[in-house]
Image (cartoon, rainbow, N blue to C red):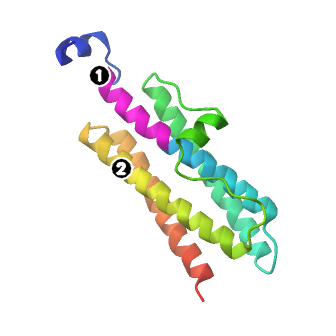
Amino acid sequence: MSITAEKRVFKKLGYNKNESEKIVGSLNKLLANYHVHYQKLRNFHWNVTGSDFFDLHEKFEELYDESFANIDLIAERIRVFGMTPYSLMKDYLEHADIEEVGTDLSSREMVEEVLRDFQILVDNMNECAEKVADLGDTATEDMLIAFIKSLELHHWMLTSFIKE
């Protein structure tokens, strides 16, 4: 099917089916990573112990609240394209680069895990932003840039927190 014919058959927000699938595929990958990260933050919030308990318990809650809001924005953006966001744990675990961890980490190990997750998320967001920018999807690009700015700030703060 030619691109011209494809545009006549499927057109959502000015994107043809192939373009929409590229955007949504990239967003679903980000959604999977964000969900595993979110659950990891809840794990750490519930299970942090030691002298850093009060600081990190509160910080992990702040981070998972922000993650939850971002997850919702990503899923809603996917729905804007008329497609279905991942919504099953098995899909998140299958498609995410971020991996689950246990409950027995030290507070420092938890922060180091979160910092690694931030790097994966920011890399994923930058890749996604490049794809959507190439397709002219400024709304998704703008959303991703806001996420990146926030994660970079959190990364700096947590890196400073564990610096010796």
Q: Which residue is mark 1?
A: 16
Q: Which one is nearer the viewer's eye here, 77 or 121? A: 121
Name the spot of residue 70 as percent of width and height, x first. Answer: 55, 47
Magenta segment's dominant SS is: helix
Q: Quadrant of the C terminus?
A: bottom right
Residue for point 29% across, 10% down: 9
- Would residue 146 appear left or right of 141 to someone viewing this image? right
Where residue 90 is drawn, which disc sits there? none
What amino acid is at disc 2? Answer: Glu
Magenta span covers which residues? Answer: 16-29
Against 164, residue 3 (above or below) is above
Crowd tier of the residue under label 1, counting other residues whose Cα lies within 10 Å: few below 14, some 14–19, many 20 or above: some
Name the spot of residue 100 as percent of width and height, x first. Answer: 66, 53
Q: Are marks 1 and 2 in contact (CB under 8 Å)?
A: no
Residue for point 60% across, 64% down: 114
Q: Secondary structure at mark 2?
A: helix
Against 123, residue 50 (above or below) is below
Crowd tier of the residue under label 2, counting other residues whose Cα lies within 10 Å: few below 14, some 14–19, many 20 or above: some
Name the spot of residue 88 as percent of width and height, x first. Answer: 64, 32
Residue for point 21% across, 11% down: 5
What amino acid is at disc 1? Answer: Asn
Q: Which one is nearer the viewer's eye here, 51 or 13? A: 51
Circle 1 or circle 2, nearest the eye: 2
Q: Quadrant of the N terminus?
A: top left
Q: Secondary structure at mark 1?
A: loop
* Distance CA(mark 1)–CA(mark 2): 20 Å
- Would residue 103 appear left or right of 86 to someone viewing this image? right
Mark 1 vs 2, N-terminal side: 1
Residue for point 31% across, 25% down: 18
Residue 20 on the magenta span: yes
Q: Which residue is mark 2?
A: 127
